[in-house]
């Protein structure tokens, strides 16, 4: 019998370890409980069109495509505010997803723009983001021992995404999430700031922060650069059985168009939703107000108009409409909460949430 070459003898222990390691990983993969998406056990929140358009994850249903401008329809493909929620006693949660058109804006972290967050029992655990091919495959360790935990997966704020599967430990239980205390969603309409620019993480937007603070469902209809107060969006919003509507679209229209759009938008909402609380948010602080008189005049005029418009409607009997001073959401002293002098970073969205929370609690009672 011929003896093995000395070099092969030296390599044998490493080959055995590698082969065993592969077998172990393969066995572990085989033992996981893989749930192909979509599945009733993986309910989607925050995307009201999902029931009609599953498995596509977007913010407006396909039947409204011809009702809105192409720019708005394109932005509706970004699933900002979308969440998958469930309870499980698994010690791990995995996700396989794809974001083929991922990118990196200069002023926004890739995770917030393109990635997913996982929260367990209301606490941030981790994130995942696309590789060079736009693929995501991540498994998180969420606990040391099997016990029921609330899991929330937040979808990307700025890029379309598809989900292939969610995986759990073999034999793990999966159950519906606990219902929200405020089950009817708060609907937010506005600009890129509302959509989530420029939060570091999907779970760090103002709306997601308020979701956890208030235990309230929400729908995010912020349309980056295109929150112009168009009637088509008012008609889409009034279809929704909301608990409250927050109008935060001051950033995109010039003063004259804002003054023209806001009354029409509110009147369209009131035609079908006469009793839903509406919060009208005025501009928060821009540093350019201190350096540019025209910016300051425009911002102040928008604040004044929004305040007087709400006061007028309340005087006429609409007691369910409320003015929210944007300077209480982000002031000159909180300017460190801006990433480019306009959009919020994660600190800025925390300021926004703290400022908006009292008005929402009053509206929701």
Image: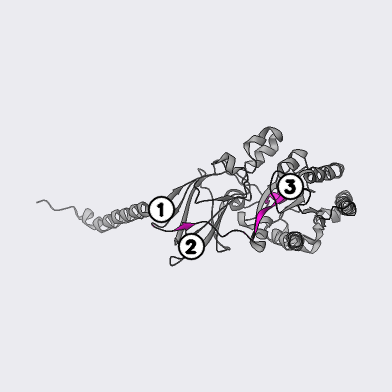
Residue 258 lies in what quarter of the image?
A: top right
Q: Secondary structure at mark 1?
A: strand
Residue 46 % position (x, y): 62, 50
Look at discs 3 and 1 and give the one toward the viewer.
Answer: 1
Residue 42 % position (x, y): 51, 51
Q: What numbered label is drawn on residue 33?
A: 1
Q: Nearer the viewer, residue 261 or 214?
A: 214
Tag 1 or tag 2, which sits nearer the N-term? 1
Look at discs 2 and 1 and give the one toward the viewer.
Answer: 1
Residue 244 % position (x, y): 73, 53
**Residue at 58% across, 48% down:** 114
Q: Secondary structure at mark 3?
A: loop
**Residue at 62% across, 42% down:** 49
Within-10-Å neighbours for mark 2: few <14, some 14–19, many 20+: many
Q: What numbered label is drawn on residue 142?
A: 2
Q: What numbered label is drawn on residue 179?
A: none
**Residues marked 2 and 3 touching at CB (< 8 Å):** no
Q: As drawn, is 90 to the left or to the right of 183?
A: left
Q: Nearer the viewer, residue 249 or 293?
A: 249
Residue extending furthest top? 66
Tag 1 or tag 3, which sits nearer the N-term? 1
Whether residue 358 is situated above or below residue 197 in the rendered picture: below
Tag 3 or tag 2, which sits nearer the N-term? 2
Q: Which residues are magenta?
A: 171-199
Task: Read off the residue under disc 3.
Answer: 191
């Amino acid at each position: 019998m011929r003896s093995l070459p000395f070099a092969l003898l030296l390599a044998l222990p490493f080959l055995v370890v590698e082969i065993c390691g592969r077998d172990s990983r393969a066995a572990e993969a085989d033992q996981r409980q893989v749930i192909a998406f979509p599945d009733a056990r993986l309910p989607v929140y925050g995307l009201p069109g999902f029931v009609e358009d599953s498995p596509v994850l977007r913010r407006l249903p396909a039947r409204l495509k011809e009702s809105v401008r192409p720019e708005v329809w394109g932005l509706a493909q970004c699933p900002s505010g979308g969440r998958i929620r469930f309870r499980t006693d698994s010690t791990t949660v995995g996700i396989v997803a794809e974001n083929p058109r991922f990118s990196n804006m200069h002023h926004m972290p890739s995770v917030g723009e393109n990635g997913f967050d996982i929260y367990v029992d209301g606490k941030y655990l981790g994130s995942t983001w696309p590789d060079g091919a736009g693929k995501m495959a991540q498994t998180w360790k969420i606990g040391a021992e099997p016990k029921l935990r609330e899991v929330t997966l937040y979808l990307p704020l700025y890029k379309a995404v598809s989900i292939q599967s969610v995986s759990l430990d073999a034999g793990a239980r999966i159950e519906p999430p606990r219902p929200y205390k405020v089950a009817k969603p708060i609907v937010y309409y506005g600009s890129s700031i509302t959509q989530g620019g420029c939060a570091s993480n999907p779970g760090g937007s103002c709306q997601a922060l308020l979701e956890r603070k208030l235990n309230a469902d929400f729908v995010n209809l912020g349309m980056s650069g295109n929150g112009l107060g168009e009637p088509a969006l008012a008609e889409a919003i009034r279809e929704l059985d909301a608990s409250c509507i927050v109008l935060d679209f001051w950033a995109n229209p010039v003063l004259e168009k804002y003054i023209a759009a806001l009354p029409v938008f509110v009147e369209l909402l009131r035609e079908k939703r006469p009793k839903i609380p509406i919060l009208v948010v005025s501009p928060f602080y821009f540093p350019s107000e201190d350096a540019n008189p025209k910016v300051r005049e425009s911002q102040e005029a928008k604040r004044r108009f929004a305040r007087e418009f709400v006061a007028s409607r309340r005087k006429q009997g609409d007691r369910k409409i409320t003015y929210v001073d944007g300077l209480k959401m982000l002031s000159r002293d909180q300017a460190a909460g801006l990433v480019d002098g306009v959009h919020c970073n994660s600190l800025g969205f925390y300021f926004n949430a703290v400022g908006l929370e009292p008005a929402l609690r009053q509206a929701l009672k």
